[in-house]
Amino acid sequence: MLYNSSVDLYFVDSVFIFLLSEVSNLFFCGIILLLLFYFKTLNLTEVIFWFGGFASIIIMAPFIQDLFPDSGGYLRCVRDLKDNLSFDEIGCQASIAAESESFQFLNFKRSVPAVYYSIIPIPSISTIMSLAFINKIYLLFLYIFLRNRINNNEIKFYLLLLFFFPTILLYSTTGLREILILIVQSFLLITIIERKWIPSIVLIFLLASVKTQNAAVFLILFSGSLIFRSDKSFSYLFVFSILFCLTVFTYEREILDVINYFRIGFLKENYMIPLSGIVIEYESILSLMINSPLLFLKGIFSPGFGMSGLNIIFFPESILYVALFIWGAKRSNYFSESLNWLVFITGLVGIILNLIVVDNDSTYLRYRFTFTYLLMFHLLLFMGKKETKQPTEIGKTLHQF
């Protein structure tokens, strides 16, 4: 482990230490790729793509280390756990994240991800970018897991490309928990679809420990599929939808209290409370439901077109996501099955929930990312399972390079 325990963490400015640390991590990841290639788990095209992905961490580091200042907190917790076999730092310990007369949540925001990050024995956790290599390794195994459930080589190649779109490339070159959230959600999606009760329950709790609100959203898919069997027919989906709406209206006040509490808490945390001190709260679930199509479209294309910051990348990419999803859905007749509607509704609720709670564009894009990719993954899985025809010559050439 290459770091001085008396130093909190190193940045790119410490060029020698940064290169010594991250080149050793890159070498470690290269060995993993060679082993996977040797055992025929990856082909040459995939090895080239993924090595480029690992190398991009070092290449992009000078440009992105200041974009996500909170990523250093996860690294501190990993080092705290490795040094002390416990969490001694206050920021790494479980704490009450929300508390009122009617609800209370425990915050494991950094402690649980630190445990996940500690599983992978990378050579160095010296710099703010070190955990990015672990994120990439986890993504690599997620890719293999999803690819093995696809029958069509052309769709497999589309899946490979999806792992190197700008958004996922950016977030996986940092030490943020969004990659872990995406991975847990993806495994949870598969276990629910395959009707595996115990793994699904375990993953729901794991997701809740990392991101409570995402776990709450996934209860829609969990209960709709495993309990009400809405994945079997549209009639079951209709019954579930009615019961879900009745439940939401019955507990409308409690749900609104939670939404407003977290929204105000987010504004306070980011010093975005208006000078008047007055924050307009949501007062009607019905109003949110009626406006949900518009909110969903706003959420998909947020923060809109702009030439500053990352907008110039995210907005065109959002258009590309929508175009690809429409193309894939039309090609595979995606919405002909009730399960796909249930997955789509889960993603829709997740995107809308984050939109109405988070007022910061940069943070919202991170939160939206996990649900956007969830929908894209499921679409490709559905296409890959349904389409067993021979791939096009382009797809065959690229995938079997």
Image (cartoon, grey):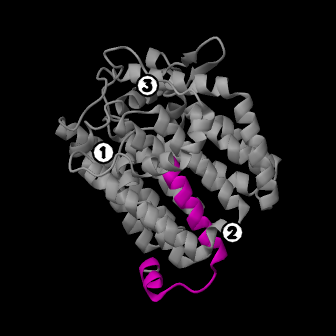
If you read the primary sequence from the N terminus, does the residue marked by circle 3 or circle 1 appear first?
1
- Is 374 covered by the magenta stretch? yes
- Mark 3 touching mark 2, by CB under 8 A? no
> Dividing the picture into quarters, in which one does residue 285 lie?
top right
Crowding around mark 1 (Cα neighbors within 10 Å: few <14, some 14 to 19, many 20+) is many
Identify the residue at image location x=46%, y=14%: 90
Secondary structure beneath label 3: helix
Query: Helix, strand, or loop for circle 2?
Result: helix
Q: CA distance from mark 1 to mark 2?
A: 47 Å
Left or right: 48, with 220 as reference point: left
Q: In terms of sequence position, does the residue under pointer 1 or pointer 2 come before the other?
A: 1
Cβ atoms at labels 3 and 1 below 8 Å apart = no
Which amino acid, by three-letter code, is at mark 2? Ser
Point out the stretch of residues depicted in magenta. 371-399
Residue 317 appears left or right of 190: left
Residue at the spot of label 1: 22
State which quarter of the image contains the N terminus. top left
Residue that label 2 marks: 336
Q: Residues within 10 Å of mark 3 (few under 14, many from 20)?
A: some
The residue pinned by badge 3 equals 266
Image point (36%, 34%), residue name? 360
| Residue 17 percent location from the top left of the image | 23, 37
On screen, residue 170 versus residue 150, left or right, reads left
Quadrant containing the C terminus is bottom left
Circles 1 and 2: CB atoms closer than 8 Å: no
N-terminal of the pair, mark 3 or mark 2, is: 3
Give how far across and how far down residue 35 sits, in percent. 48, 62
Give the residue drawn at x 19%, y 35%.
14
